[in-house]
Structures are given as structure tokens and as C-alpha cells.
Amino acid sequence: MKFTLKIWRQENAKAKGHFETYKVDGISPDTSFLEMMDILNEQLVNEKINPVAFDKGCKGEHSGPVSFDHDCREGICGACSLYINGRAHGPESGVTTCQLYMRKFKDGSTITIEPWRSSGFPIIKDLVVDRRAYDKILQAGGFISVNTGGVPDANAIPIKKEKADKSMDAAACIGCGACAATCKNGSAMLFVAARVSSLALLPQGKIEGARRAKAMVDTMDALGFGSCTNTRACEMECPKGISVEHIARLNREFLSAKLSE
């Protein structure tokens, strides 16, 4: 298979970015998207290909290999944050970029690849964005600080299966940032809601529930993320299928915290 890749290039956070277009050929349908990016970079390093076309504003210089994030390549870490053809993680639902394969694209097609577009995720270089904002939100309250002792027996604290299942579903969030990148407001509410909800549903998390919700929402706002207007775009693009139901729970927890002040 062969593809035309229209890739966002930006030297650093302060530089003006632009698209560069590359051609790749001989790509197996079973090649993952990140493996295809590796092949492109190997060719760029070996100077086998150069940008073949440039958008307005690009001078046409060779920019070297394309910088992009990756780690586990198993859909666990959330590092492979790419906006592909106008969708977070690409055209297939329920997967991260590293789980996307080139057979999902038509042979000879043009693929546009961009970094996350959110004020909370400033660009570092090319397709790499600074996602430390999510870490700061977690540090504000995404934990249980009370001493719960050693590991209890499985039946020591009875929890309804329905609540346990919802808590586990929320905890499946990998913090990739697709929700904020997809939201027209750049809101991180689904991420915050998943982290709050995973603890709010458990007895151990209820003690600090109100403080946790307020602290995490306040931090999210301070970091420049937008507000939620319930378009549900975040839910549609979340690779783990986190439900917006958790946002409703976050709102209840946050309101409780404000009323108790």
C-alpha cells in the first residue's frame, strides 16, 4: 500500500507550525499506524525521501524525523496521542493510535496527521504535546490519602456489583487526552469525571469525595481547559468508552462540595 502523509511540523512551542507532505510506499496492510510512522522516520533519517509538497508558509527545508509520542504500543499508556483525518486516534472507534492498522485506510489515500489541539496541551515539537496538565489534575485530588491499613479480605467491605463495575469502568481511563482534544471547548471533564467517579463509588473514596471533586475541577479550570456543554463528542472518541454518565456524578460531587463550604 502507498499513502500521502500530510504531517504537522513545528520546531518548538514558539515556532510557527506548518504541514509537510510525504510519500510512503510498500506499506503492509497489517502494519500498525505507529510502525508506519517508524518506517517514514527511518527513510527520513537515511535521506531516502524528502518532503514532496509544502503548504503555504513552509520554506521546503528538510526537517528530519517526525517527533511523536509512544510507549507501550498496547493501548494501555495513552501516550500515542495523534489527531488523524480529523479524529482523535484515527477512524476506528474504541482503539488508541497504536492499535490502528493501515488496512483501515484506502490504498493511495491522503492521511492528515496533527497533534492534540487544546490550550491545555501546548505543542512541544511536531506531534508531541505537553500532557502534564493531567498529572497536575491528578495531584490535586485523584487519590485516597486516608490510611486504610493492609489489604483487606475480598468480602470485608461489601460493595454492590453494579457500583464496583461502574468504578472499574471509570478506572479504565488511560489519560490519553482524546476527550479534551475532541471537545469543541477543549474540556477535560470526562477525564476528571472518570478519576473522581472511580473513587466516589467506593466506600474508601467517599471520605474525601467533596474535597477531591472541587480540587480537581478548580485545577482543570486553572490549567486552561474549557467547560463541558454535553455534546458527548468526548464519549464517542474515548478509546476506552468512558461514559458521560460519570460527568453527571462529578457535577453532583462538585455541587455537594460547594454547598458544604
Image (spheres, rainbow, N blue to C red):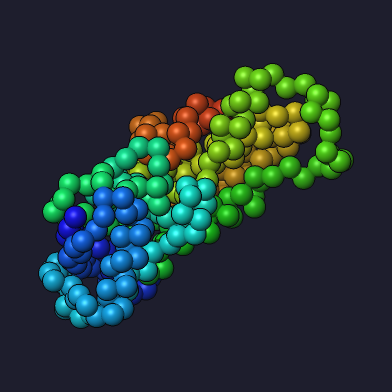
**In the image, residue 221 above or below residue 59:** above
Asked whether residue 129 appears in the rendered view, the answer is: yes
Please identify the quadrant where the C terminus is shown. Answer: top right
Q: Nearer the viewer, residue 76 or 188?
A: 76
Which residue is located at x 73 percent, y 22 percent? 159
Residue lying furthest right in this view?
149
Please identify the quadrant where the N terminus is shown. Answer: bottom left
How many marks overall?
A: 0
**In the image, residue 155 above or below residue 132:** above
**In the image, residue 186 above or below residue 80:** above
From the top left corner, tell me how far across and down residue 214 is, in percent.
62, 40
From the top left corner, tell me how far across and down residue 70 is, in percent.
45, 60
Asked where in the image residue 112 lies, by quadrant, the reply is: bottom left
Left or right for 21, reference 159: left
Which residue is located at x 40 percent, y 37 percent? 94
Left or right for 6, reference 45: left
From the top left corner, tell me how far across and down residue 198 is, in percent.
62, 34
Asked where in the image residue 9 lies, by quadrant, the reply is: bottom left
Which residue is located at x 37 percent, y 34 percent? 236
From the top left corner, tell me how far across and down residue 45 is, in percent.
31, 78
Left or right for 63, reference 89: left
Which residue is located at x 32 percent, y 40 percent? 92
